[in-house]
Image (cartoon, helix red, strand yellow):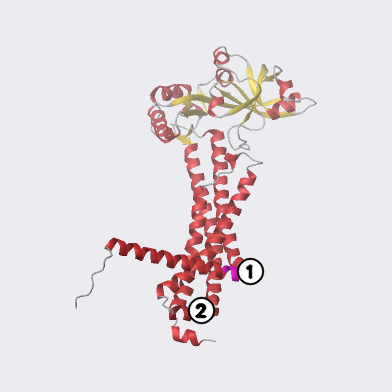
Amino acid sequence: MVPARSHHSPTFTRTLASAKQTMVFSEILHLAVDSFRANKVRFALTALGMVMGSASVILVVTIGLTGKQYAVNYIQGIGANMITADYQGGGTGTVAADQDYLTKDDLTAVVNQVPGIVAASPMLQMHDRVSFGNGNVKDVLVLGVSPQYKDIRNLVVLSGRFFDQQDAISHSKVAVVTLPFAKNLFGSADAAVNKSFSIKGIPFTIIGIFKERVNTYGQMEIARQTILIPYPVARYFTGTDAVKTLYFSVQDFSDVTRARDDIARVIQSRHRANSVYDVQENAALLTTVEQIANILTMVLLLVSAVTLAVSGVGIMNIMLATVRSRIREIGIRKAVGATYREIQLQFLTEAVLISLSGGVVGTILGLAIPLSARFFLPAELIPISPWSVVISLGTAMLVGILFGTLPATRAAQMDPVEALKYE
């Protein structure tokens, strides 16, 4: 006799099988939830380690990004697009007359030949002793610069104004001074404006008070007691065309490295072959700082990974204990037709749910702290990366899978006959 042909199409058969699989997984999920309800305290304590680990991942990434942002803001405050050129040595002899110093003409040549430069300034440096009254005399740093120096170095004018191109052309005896200088000499910034003092016996009028956008603590050319005067006036004191440093600023941050190489080439072409000039950019420092911040963040993430691993071991131990306490249940399920895969998936689902639940709670807690800090600090100072959430939840799920596989496999491998005999 020929067997009756099935009236169901292949598509219907696949749909039925898919529905069966969906039903099986929903049943497994329901069993896992029932297991958690029956052991709420054990479930909460097991997930606690994952809560701490996931929260630490969010906080570590946030702290790393915050540190990087602070460093970037700091360097950009100094001048991320700034390039400096200094004479290092070389020449035909050891006396000053034989040295191959940089000059104002070098700055003009660079501006004319290197594209992308938006500001440039020479810098002359000298020292003078200024009397602050009552016999109090201090050494003061005097820098001769151009008006564009203010933009290159991101200086902030607190009171008055910075000298302009007309002041430089007319050789005006004007100066802008640091806030400590103004306070020491005249008591306050506002009181110092339009007051006079002498440099090498020549009277200068203070037209402005300035500060660095970020305090470099004397590591750059500006010190606490610093006076800025127009370069043509400063040249009157030195009597030479030689300058200490040339400052440049480019339009686009991406052009800094290219401009640095071009500046070095132009300067070297104008001087002796054995003369050495140091052309530096803050962009390289910015890249280095970002790399250091990334490395530190990765190290801290590895420390957080240890917490997650310890939590995973806890999950595995609890799941092994759960398997031992439910041996008869496993035997009954196998006796009524549960397959190896279904038993394994049941216990693996429980492990992943414990881990993922802890990960969700930890992620919420980890985000709550920096979000709360944004109520008191500017949001841009505390960046929060969406990737930290992805890493936190992804790691939580991975930990559940890795450390839940062994208990799930052990449960699935049990002999149903032996399991039913277990007391």
Please state which amino acid type lies under the numbered disc 2: Glu
Please state which amino acid type lies under the numbered disc 1: Val
* Label total for image: 2
- Considering only order in the chain, which callout, 1 or 2, is on the residue closer to the N terminus? 1
Residue 20: x %, y % from top left: 39, 66
Q: Is residue 20 visible in this depiction of the protein?
A: yes
Q: Is residue 274 visible in this depiction of the protein?
A: no
For mark 2, does the 10 Å Cα neighbourhood hold few (<14), some (14 to 19), or many (20 or more) residues? some
Q: Main secondary structure of the magenta part?
A: helix
Depth order, front residue of 331/190? 331
Q: Which residue is the site of mark 1?
A: 41
Which residue: 52% across, 77% down?
Answer: 323
> On the rendered structure, is 76 left or right of 334?
right
Q: Secondary structure at mark 1?
A: helix
Query: What residue range appears in magenta?
Result: 36-42
Quadrant of the image for the C terminus? bottom right
Which residue: 43% across, 72% down?
Answer: 342
Depth order, front residue of 260/91? 260
For mark 1, does the 10 Å Cα neighbourhood hold few (<14), some (14 to 19), or many (20 or more) residues? few
Vertical placement of residue 417 versus 404, above or below:
below
| Distance in Å between CA atoms under marks 2 and 1 | 21 Å
Q: Is 392 in the magenta?
A: no
Q: Secondary structure at mark 2?
A: helix
Vertical placement of residue 79 versus 186, above or below:
below
Picture disc at residue 329: 2
Q: Is 40 in the magenta?
A: yes
